[in-house]
Amino acid sequence: MGDCIFCKIANGEIPSNTIFEDENFRVILDNGPATKGHALVLPKKHYADLFEIPEETLAGAVKTAKKVAANMKDKLGCDGLNLVQNNGAAAGQTVMHFHLHIIPRYENDGQSILWKPTSPTPEELVAVKETILN
Ligand code: 5GP
Ligand code: ZN
């Protein structure tokens, strides 16, 4: 993927603030962080999103996030942490190279990673279930 910025960052062609690296992943600080320590797990190979990434690579990304998260809790003293992963423009994905956000959270950090709950009827929920299952 010649023009993918995250391919270039993940493979070291463009410098980044790397906080973890191994054969398959690079973890960098987000340059527009939601909070102090906001990081991105980047696979070194290009996959656009959850639909493209192989299961083993996805598992590796989550394992990597777990290691980095433990280190963040220890070193940054965060009070909580969100893992966020966007797929498709409709879901807020802006860089079309799979990445997992690690967002350390602090009491009163002023951020919000929430949605507005809706109120479907029980029948509507069943209809959704049937659509997914059939
Ligand atoms: P998305 O909205 O696609 O899930 O997240 C993309 C994230 O990548 C954003 O949080 C944005 O701040 C970050 N980002 C975009 N371009 C760069 C870059 O060149 N370097 C770094 N470190 N982060 C980037
Ligand atoms: Zn890429």
Image: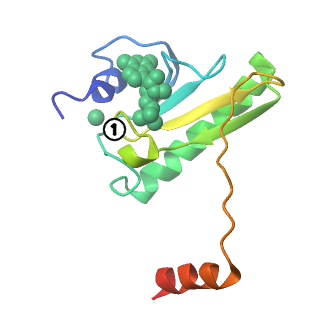
Residue 111: x and y in percent read 69, 27
Which residue occupies the foreground of this view, 57 or 115? 115
Graded by Cα atoms within 10 Å as few (under 14), some (14 to 19) or many (20 or more), the crowding at tag 1 reads many
Is the shortest distance between ligand 2 and the CB of mark 1 under 8 Å?
A: yes
According to the picture, the residue beneath numbered tag 1 turns out to be 97
Tell me: residue 39, above or below residue 114: above
Which residue occupies the foreground of this view, 96 or 43? 96
User: Which residue is drawn at the image coordinates 48% and 15% (left, top)?
Assistant: 31
Is 9 placed left or right of 56 in the picture? left
Is 49 placed left or right of 21 in the picture? left
Residue 29: x and y in percent read 52, 19
Give the quadrant of residue 3: top left
Q: Is residue 75 visible?
A: yes
Tell me: residue 48, above or below residue 29: below
User: Which residue is drawn at the image coordinates 51% and 46% (left, top)?
Assistant: 60
Which residue occupies the foreground of this view, 132 or 27? 132
Which residue occupies the foreground of this view, 91 or 63? 91
Ligand 2 position by quadrant: top left
Tell me: residue 52, above or below residue 92: below
Residue 119: x and y in percent read 69, 66
Farthest left residue?
Answer: 2
